[in-house]
Amino acid sequence: MAPVDPHSYTDGAHPVTKHAALSFYLDFTVSTIHASALLTLSEPHSGDLLLDTRAVSVHSATTAADPPEPIPFSLAASPDPVLGSALTLTLPPDTTSFRLTFSTSPDASALQWLAPPQTASAQPFVFSQCQSIHARSVFPCHDTPAARITFSLLLNVPSQLSAVAAARHVGRRDPLPSDHCGACDEALWCAPGRVVEEFEMEQPVPPYLFAFAAGGIGSRDLGPRTRVYAEGGDKVLDEAAREFAGVEDMVKVGEDLFGPYEWERFDLLVLPPSFPYGGMENPRMVFLTPTVIKGDASGAQVVAHELAHSWTGNLITNKTNEDFWLNEGFTTYAERRIVEVVQGEERAALNMGIGWRGLNQMMERFKDNMEFTKLKPKMAGIDPDDVYSEVPYEKGFQFLWRIERQIGRPAFDEFIKKYIATFKFQSIDTETFLEFLKANVPGIENQIDLHLWVEGTGIPPDAMEPDSAIYKKICSLAAEFKSGKLPSEDEVADWNGQEWELYLENLPTDVEASQVTALDERYKLSESRDYEVKVAFLQLAIPAGCKCYFNEVEKCLKQVGRMKYLRPLYSSLAKCSGEEKMLAQRIFSEAQEFYHPIARGVAESILSKHS
């Protein structure tokens, strides 16, 4: 076997899937998808072929011939805790296509099924989150970013619901007997009260970008190629439309900086609060947490990040999770360039300042395993969700910013455009990037220690803290807090969420409870609508012993499933002794069914580590 990815059973000596024709019957009563997949390989193959699965029940494997012939298959008896189970097919000579029928598990790690009482529309809802290695829990596949696929998708849903996907919407129609291809009984597929939503993705994407959602979803147009969708009715749609009104301008700025937008549409789906990330860059249909709707348009920075992925991450993709910085470091750089144009240099500098603080916090988090402070860490046997951090984002950004400072922005802009044009619709590794860098910027390896940046632990000495007047002023005010000085109302008069977030993140951690409550009495930070501010404040209050905020902590952990907030709040509680630790365990026991499976696993690991 020639493995291509430490997180996949894919054999590099065998062809990979290039197209998947998927028929999904969404059964909300049992939180299960009954499915059929016609998989087409990149070239004919005979003998064993391995696919990735996790908790998928495979019912049959047949050739694509008419009539179909059964294909022998077997699933590994005991699943690997990280990889899941290998599905081994024994293909007849010169097979190019074959069909699988299967069902997902109600506990599929990519899927969250919400009952009507859990949704604003009082309708059932389901959504997928396949990054990093969860597509295999939805359908058997070569679940590695090294294997890009095109796909068609039929979603059979109750007629009162709507469906969206990260693909071109072909149409909504009645089910046809020819659609199901063995996914379920024809009578079930074509039952009254069901409709089919049809989608097509003609551009090759890594499996982790496969995405769909179904529920009581409405929409608002934002521009000629942008629309916002949401589950939550007119109120959420109106708020989202105001927050993201400038998205079309952002797309144009992105095109000016990085070249043509290759995905036709840039639509947004605001998901229920249990969505575990800030945003997910699914092509054509970005998924967003409702926490990015803040009322001051600052949530558009998350949209800028997901938009930037349209070039770096979706168009050019990391070959494995060991190269994750190629996705996220480039995208963080690109996001800040877009923000700089759309919202100004000071706003971009604040963004950089928050990132710099986050990177330094990651050094503390990984102090006992500095491998994960490398840009290219060794990940064999490691679940990517367990070590997900700001390192690939912020250290990756710092590396690219260092190159920009060395060669100048105009030259670096030309380099990025050439990089994107050269590798678009490909998956590459760090070594390929470095060779391209050295070939196109002669002598760069003599000016910057590339090996130290990529293979070294910690923060390199030539990384740079951002330099701006407002950033320095906020850090100075934060330093004065230790001596008891609170910022004056005049000093914070123009502050939005980002300024407060930066201020709170830079406060000393060993502060008195009286200082924390005094700050809150003056500025009501615990009541902030901006969860970045609220969570940063609660992180300060918990270790200071401010038990008066336990109710706010509990509300936060029960109302929002974004891991960016769950991780620090559960960690802060679990690191304490006695009452705080018991509070964390009680909240989790009561809230875990609200969380997406990925977030639930992260919270469980935190509580287990500190038990």
Image (cartoon, helix red, strand yellow):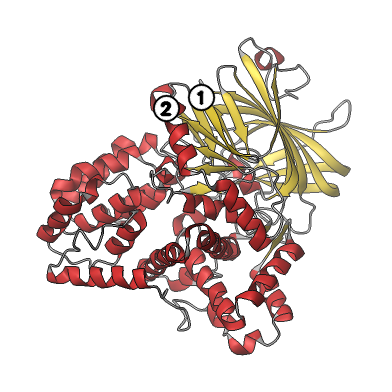
State which tag comes first along the sequence, 2 or 1. 2
- Circle 1 packing at 10 Å, graded few (<14), some (14-19), many (20+), is many
- Circle 2 packing at 10 Å, graded few (<14), some (14-19), many (20+), is some
> Of all residues shown, which one is farthest toward the top?
192
Please provide percent x and percent y for residue 468.
40, 73
Q: Which quadrant of the view contains residue 378? A: bottom right
Q: Which quadrant of the view contains residue 62? A: top right
In this picture, residue 485 sits left or right of residue 263 = left
Position of the N terminus by quadrant = bottom right
Please provide percent x and percent y for residue 458.
44, 76
Disc ID at residue 216: 1
The answer to the question of whether label 2 and label 1 lie on touching residues, with beta carbons closer than 8 A, is yes
What amino acid does circle 1 point to?
Gly
Would you name the residue on which mark 2 appears? 119
* Residue for point 51% across, 43% down: 245
Relative to 10, is 554 above or below?
above
What amino acid does circle 2 point to?
Thr
Q: Nearer the viewer, residue 590 or 271?
A: 271
In this picture, residue 11 sits left or right of residue 45 = left
Q: Is residue 319 visible?
A: no
Q: Which quadrant of the view contains residue 8? A: bottom right
* Residue for point 85% across, 43% down: 96
Relative to 84, is 259 above or below?
below
In what element is the residue under mark 1?
loop
Q: Is residue 550 visible?
A: yes
In this picture, residue 319 sits left or right of residue 478 = right
Q: Nearer the viewer, residue 374 or 169?
A: 169
Relative to 6, is 550 above or below?
above
